[in-house]
Structures are given as structure tokens and as C-alpha cells.
Image (tube, rainbow, N blue to C red):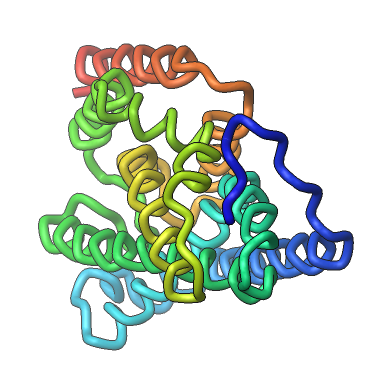
Amino acid sequence: MPTSSKLPLPSLRQWDRLMLYLSIAGIVALAWWYLIDMAAGMPEMDMQSSTSLQHWTPQTFWMMFVMWTVMMVGMMLPSAVRTILIYARIAQQSDNATVPATFCFIGGYLIVWTGFSLAATVAQWWLNQHALLSPMMVSTSDLFGANLLISAGIYQLTPFKETCLKHCQSPINFISRNFKKGYSGAAKMGFHHGLFCLGCCWILMGLLFIAGVMNLLWILAITLYVMCEKLLPANKYTAHISGILMIITGIYFIAFHS
């Protein structure tokens, strides 16, 4: 039976905790290794053909989809660690084997971000067709970047963002009250949590188009910000302050750079 959210959670068995930490760290490390390797090859790709990413082939679309999928794993999985461990601690009281069930939970979570990666790839293709991205995947329009910043800032202030963020900051009630046994149940819970996470962060991922989809420092900055939003003590002010700053920055670029 799942633990009531009003009672302290049981400690996770040492071996299970070690397996989960090492597995998550390994997955994230591999994702970042892929991104670093791909970013290192971008200048060479640009030298070979300045239009290589303007006229997409099916192979180009697949390459970009894989890039986005791996990027979302590297960016979003670290911010979900607390939720994953909470699930594991509750799962060990059920009939499931804790580690396999938790991997199913992670799988359900990543399915959501794989779907987002497909949407992001389509968006990148559209932006390329309208000459709003350079071959290095950087915005070519200050107006586009400014409007994206303003849109993201406004979204940060919405009640929907606040609801999704509260869920991500304090998922214990959701997990304990909606716990489902079995590996399919674990995957469904991970998928459900992933939808809240998507609602919280999707537009922040869109900001990658401003400074470059493969700008590693920009990717790291957004990753760290998402982790701060989710893992620091629960409050809505981080999102509100960042939203206001995004709006001000966007207005500045429209006023002085358009």
C-alpha cells in the first residue's frame, strides 16, 4: 500500500538508492557527452555547407529529432531526481521490484519529453524554412527573439504555470494518492508527472532558439534554472521574478534593437 503523504516516507534501501543514482547520473552524462560532441562538430558542419540545415532531408529531420530528444534527457532528468526518488521510496512498499518499477516511471516521464522533441524539431524546421534560424541554429531576428522572451515571461506569470510548478516542487501528494501497482502503472504515473513537467517548462526550452540550440553554456544555464525552480524550497516567486525579467529584456530588444 502507498504511504500516506502525511507520514514520513520509508528510507530507500541502500543498494536501490545506489543503483538509481548511478543509473541516472550515467544517463545524464551520456546525454551531455553526446551534446558536447555534436556541438564540437557544428563549426565544421557550417564550413562544409552554409545551407545544410536550410534544406532538410528526412535524414536531417531524424538527426535533429535525436538531438532534441537527447538534449531533453540531459536537461530535464536532473530536475526530476527528487520525484523519481519519492516514487521509488513509495514503490518499495508495493509488490513491484523497486528499481525496475522506477525505470518504468522514468520511461513514462521521458516519453512526454520525446513527444516534445518531435514538436521542437517541427518548429525548428519551420523556423529554418522562414530564415529565422542560422545554420548554427541561432535566431537571426532580434524581433523573433524578443517576442519569444516576452511570451515566455508572460507564461511564467500564469496560473497554469503556477499549478504545474507546484506539482513539480511537491509531487508527494500526487504519487501517494495516485499510486498504481505494476510496471505499466509506474509508466503511466511517470507519463502523468511528465505532463505537469512539460506544462511547467515547455516554453523555457523554446528559449534555446534565442542564443543557439547547440550553445552549451545556454543549455546549461536553462538546465540550472529549471533545477532551481523545481528543487529549491517551493515558492512561486522564482518564476514570477524571472518572468518579469524576461518581459523587460524582450521589450528592451524591441525598443533598441529592432
Count of numbered tags: 0
Task: Compare residues 80 and 60 and report the one nearer the observer.
Answer: 80
**Residue 197 can be seen, yes or no:** yes
Q: Residue at x 45, y 44 (%)?
A: 177
Picture layout, residue 30 above or below residue 147: below
Picture layout, residue 129 above or below residue 101: above
Q: Residue at x 25, y 21 (%)?
A: 158
List x then y, in percent, for residue 88: 66, 58
List x then y, in percent, for residue 12: 79, 54
In the drawing, does residue 4 fall left or right of residue 63?
A: right
Residue 221 picture quarter: top right
**Residue 43 can be seen, yes or no:** no
Q: Residue at x 21, y 78 (%)?
A: 56
Q: Residue at x 84, y 60 (%)?
A: 13
Residue placed furthest toward the front: 1
Q: Quadrant of the N terminus?
A: bottom right
In the drawing, does residue 93 fall left or right of residue 184?
A: right
In the drawing, does residue 96 fall left or right of residue 226?
A: right
In the drawing, does residue 137 fall left or right of residue 108?
A: left
Task: Compare residues 82 and 73 and report the one nearer the observer.
Answer: 82
Residue placed furthest toward the right: 14
List x then y, in percent, for residue 224: 60, 38
Q: Quadrant of the C terminus?
A: top left
List x then y, in percent, for residue 117: 33, 64
Residue 239 picture quarter: top left
Task: Compare residues 19 and 43 and report the one nearer the observer.
Answer: 19
Residue placed furthest toward the left: 130
